[in-house]
Image: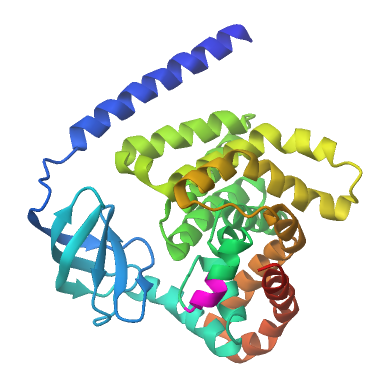
Amino acid sequence: MESRVVQDVAFFLFLSLVAVFRFLAVKPDLKDGSVVIIRDERVLSEPLRFDRSQRITILNFKAYLPLYPEVEYGDVLTIKGRLNLRKKTLENAEIISLKKGGRFFATRERIIDFFQKSLPSPYSSLVTGIVLGSKEGILPSFWEKLKKTGTAHVVVASGMNVSLVASFLFLFLIPVVGRQKAILFSLFGIWVYAVLAGFDAPIIRAALMGSLAFTALALGRQYDTLRILFLTFFAMVIFNPYWIFDVGFILSFVATLSLVLFSGKVDRLLKFIPSFVRQDFSTTISAQILVSPILYFTFGYFSIYSFLVNGLVLWTVPLITVFGMLISFISLLLPSLASVLVFIIYPLTFWFVEIVRFFA
């Protein structure tokens, strides 16, 4: 047992050194205030639209652009701007060329458009936020309520979504194609969902962890969640060293680490709570133990009753996710049927929205 721990420590120390050397190797010789042209770079996170501008993130730099032409997730841009290294922004940015992302990326927009037409706001934006991580259509007033109640993290596709996709596919396909093929299809489904939901750091983290776990299952090996978490962390940092400065990346890993370390202990402390609600409260409190200090020092806020609000609404999230994914798929084939089925989600979103409004 001790030799295994020593091996793990030595291995992760080696990966730490590789990550440091990788960071130094890829660090570009950029001068603050210099004008640069970024050529043919794909937009891998959803642009945010404001009243008079849209914000994209490209090569870890934020750029504010005019509202038109509209940039969408998956588009390929050539863009020019002045570097502000302190703020990590590309100032006075302008688009030189724009190529649309193609049919696969357009599928995501079709699904978002379907929910926006089928459900009123903010229910439609809540569904697309939970299912696909889309912030498109979220009203500023509702977004403020989500932040005040500590539930903004829910309206972002996350690791839980990836887990639900993988689990659903695995359990559904085992009786049809057998265990080994079900694992392969689940791996494929994880990465298809990752592309649809956007290659944000939390999604990639969960997709990598899920892939490693399913690979271990396929090989008949046991796996340790903590070991997989750190292996995923170093794999991502070595691939893209600048993720270490991404708040979403940090929060995703810290929340997962907090769950792994504290969920069992917190669950035992809350054994007096009925089991049908205990898991949501346990999950919320466990994740917040390490995340709360980061939220406070990074954003300057922390909701004292976020534990209660999250406990009241989290039970709806898996149901909204599963029904939302199924209806999304049906909407691509049979829109009329999907328009009827979408009202299954309405009571769940109504509960979520009203709880948030009450506590905000």
Q: Picture coordinates of residue 87 (x, y %)?
A: 26, 52
Q: How many marks?
A: 0
Position of 231 relative to 143 (above/below)? above
Q: Residue at x 29, y 27 (%)?
A: 20
Q: In screen coordinates, is 238 left or right of 233?
A: left
Q: In screen coordinates, is 317 left or right of 200?
A: right
Residue 162 appears in which quarter of the rendering?
bottom right
The quadrant the N terminus occupies is: top right
Q: Picture coordinates of residue 235 (x, y %)?
A: 40, 35
Camera-nearest residue between 339 and 37: 37
Q: Picture coordinates of residue 188 (x, y %)?
A: 50, 54
Residue 138 inside the magenta-drawn segment: yes
Q: Residue at x 70, y 45 (%)?
A: 285
The quadrant the C terminus occupies is: bottom right
Residue 48 inside the magenta-drawn segment: no
Residue 277 appears in which quarter of the rendering?
bottom right
Q: In screen coordinates, is 358 left or right of 201?
A: right
Residue 177 visible in the current orientation: yes
Residue 354 appears in which quarter of the rendering?
bottom right
Camera-nearest residue between 284 and 275: 284
Position of 313 relative to 1 (above/below)? below
Q: Residue furthest bottom?
A: 336
The colour scheme used here is rainbow
Q: In screen coordinates, is 55 left or right of 145?
A: left
First to last magenta residue range = 137-143
Q: Residue at x 61, y 92 (%)?
A: 336
Residue 214 visible in the current orientation: no
